[in-house]
Image (spheres, rainbow, N blue to C red):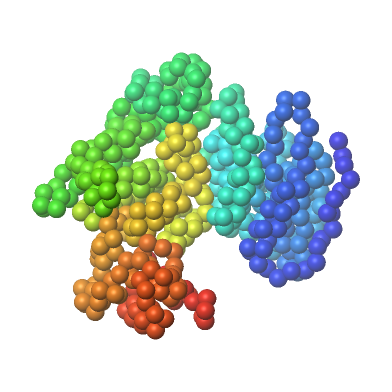
Amino acid sequence: MSKQRNGDKKIAKMKFDARKLMKLALEVMERSVPEPRKDEKLSPLVGAVLYMPDGTVETASRGELRYGDHAEFALLERKNRQTKLDGAILFTTLEPCAPGARSFPKLSCAERVYLARIKEIWIGIEDPDPKVDRKGIRYLQDNGVTVRMFDRDLQELIKEKNKEAIAQALERAAEAEEAPKKIVLSRFEESIAAVHLQDFSSESLEEYRTRAGIKDVAGSPGFNRRLLQQGLLKEINGTFVPTGFGLLLFAREPRTAISQAGLLATLHNPDGTEGTRDFDGPMVQVPILVEKWLEDKLPSTIDRSQMRRKEKPRLPFEMVREGLVNALIHRDYDIREAKCQLIVTPDTVTIKSPGSPLPPITLEQLQSFNAPMLSRNPLLHYVFAQMELAEERGLGLKTLKSLAQKENLPLPKYSFEDPYVVLTIFRNAAATFEGLDPKILRKLNDDDKKVLQFVSSRDSVTSIDLKQEFGFDERKAQRVLKKLVETGLLRRIGKGPSTRYEVKR
């Protein structure tokens, strides 16, 4: 059913400002028109913004011109079919659907973007359906389109506004009869030679079923059908066989077929001794087994700082779990020569995950805990999110940061040591000085060290924060901050009363 066109005219010219255009896309998203359906199927709210080379801007929302029309389709085909879009930049709150996602002869939105000769697109969130997740993005990248993601805080707003539609879409995906297969993100989406369903661990399948709240009995036809739709099984000649990702998650011995699977763990004790263990079983059980191993090796201590004694673990287990899960599910499994590693020392926990940050995510964004939500391996991420062992769409950054601040620990640090993304979690405040040049360390007095520890557990601070925390006067606060800047330990941001200081990570 056609409706009267709304907002069909280009709005006034504006200077290119990515943040403003992202926010405009969210405003347009709110104007999406729900499609009336007897089956009560919810459609996502989607907004799209087209920034033209001359600075003019045009918008479209889902269903704006006709029920069910995707926002990108309305914007590119209905409003700009005769317009030359070379040099235009597109902003859309949801990943464009990938080739194969729509019934023939309909073109996917990703194909329409490419055919419109658009060379840059900013995307809000990935398509939540694990069968098509990131495949629209991959198609665009493979065809020379520069893909960028919305700022993290705006991604959170998009997710919240589409919470019910996303939950419903995920449930439909698990029960669907067919899944789009055209775009392949990884060879591990395919079946592995000489691997059978019997190679799965019944214990790992039950672990998944229980934690994810799946009603079908593990191993039953209904349960296997669910794994099929999630891309963890393939049906070949009427027989279910594991895909590479299914094998990584549930196989008793995944390394038999995928040598880079698993985790190498090393524990360095204060007395100079060390313990090692290889975790080579089903991936879904690795985080639980690692935590049990460390609990046995690192008994709790007694916190006597309060009247009531309280057992306190000698390791920030929640932070370790978050970092470890994300290392396992976001690593690049095409790197065969490297495995995930966990290294525990008296002061730090280091987690190494093979693979550079997934474009367009940058190391700088990881270091600032502001990287956009994007999954390298959506099929793995979906399973761990269902088990409530990973942030639903993120990289664990929000959790890592908030837990460190809660425990007054230095914020974790990200670095890249080819071929690993390295996450360092600090076990105590003194670990702030881990790895510092001894010459610089000798220049720091007690006040300098106190301030450096304080700043290390926060995004940034002002001189007022130091005055409130340590009772410094303004002159002393400024003197300490200036010294830490001159030694290269802090970075100054801004000028005047709004000046802030952050640790160089």
Q: Quadrant of residue 437?
A: bottom left
Which residue occupies the foreground of this view, 368 or 173?
368
Name the side, left or right, on which 93 lies relative to 454: right
x, y percent for residue 137? 57, 48
Quick check: can you spot residue 294? no
Q: Residue at x 51, y 24 (%)?
A: 226
Q: In the rendered picture of this protein, how many numbered marks are placed on residues?
A: 0
Q: Relative to 315, does residue 194 appear above or below in the rendering?
A: above
Name the side, left or right, on which 473 lies relative to 157: left
x, y percent for residue 4? 89, 45
Q: Quadrant of residue 254?
A: top left
Which residue occupies the foreground of this view, 325 or 259?
325
Q: Relative to 503, does residue 160 appear above or below in the rendering?
A: above
User: For the C terminus, which image quadrant?
Assistant: bottom left
Q: Relative to 218, does residue 132 appear above or below in the rendering?
A: below
Which residue occupies the foreground of this view, 330 or 36?
36
Residue found at the very far front of the displayed protein: 307
Q: Residue at x 45, y 17 (%)?
A: 217
Q: Relative to 500, does residue 388 appear above or below in the rendering?
A: above
Q: Quadrant of residue 38?
A: top right
Name the side, left or right, on which 352 lies relative to 277: right
User: For the N terminus, which image quadrant?
Assistant: top right
Which residue occupies the foreground of this view, 340 or 216?
216
Q: Residue at x 63, y 56 (%)?
A: 121
Quick check: can you spot residue 484? yes
x, y percent for residue 412? 36, 57
Name the side, left or right, on which 227 lies relative to 2: left
x, y percent for residue 327? 37, 46
Q: Residue at x 28, y 35 (%)?
A: 289
